[in-house]
Amino acid sequence: MPLLSGSECASAVSDVRAMICSSGQMAAVLRRDVGENLFGHDAEPFNEVGTLPLELNRTPPEDLPGDIDAVASVLPEADVQDEDRLTLEGETYRIQTIVEERLFGVVTHKSLRLVQIDVG
């Protein structure tokens, strides 16, 4: 017997979506061109591939590794990949890790572990 009904699962996803969108934060997603990786992670050009709503927390939980500078929650269908860049509010972050967050088996959102990078 499932713990949540189909409508309860849909409601949970909808509630998390509303919270993320209500943050009012939008980030540009930057991605390296396919095949480009000559000089290392940050030396290659990145191109904007879209924007997405997110909720950014610049104070990550203490149980994350020390190199994580922020955590962002994004919608479950967000087109993001490890090593993509996010830019918002004049800051640039590298996506270190993507974690699908689940509530009793249904993916409600993705959590992005971010490392702030200096692009200058």
Image (cartoon, rainbow, N blue to C red):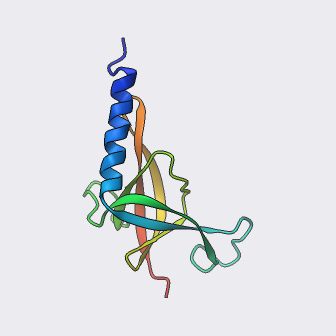
Q: Where residue 19 appears, x then y in whole percent?
A: 30, 50
Count of numbered marks: 0
Q: Position of residue 103 (x, y in %)?
A: 35, 33
- Between 40 and 27, the residue placed more toward the observer is 27
Front residue of 75/1: it is 75
Picture layout, residue 40 above or below residue 29: below
Please report the residue visible at 71 percent of the width from the left and 76 percent of the height from the top: 38
Q: Nearer the viewer, residue 9 or 18?
A: 18
Residue 83 position by quadrant: bottom right
Residue at 36% across, 24% down: 7
Horizontal relation, residue 99 to residue 64: left or right: right
Please give left or right for residue 82 compared with residue 111 in the image: right
Residue at the spot 47% in from the left edge and 56% down from the top edge: 97
Residue nearest the observer in this picture, 62 or 102: 102
Residue depicted at x 46% and y 45%: 76
Decide: is 110 above or below 42. above
In the rendered view of the protein, which quadrant contains the N terminus?
Answer: top left
Q: Residue furthest bottom?
A: 120
Residue 8 percent location from the top left of the image:
33, 26
| Left or right: where 95 falls relative to 36 | left
Residue 96 rendering spot, x and y as whole percentages: 47, 61
Residue occupying the far top of the picture: 1
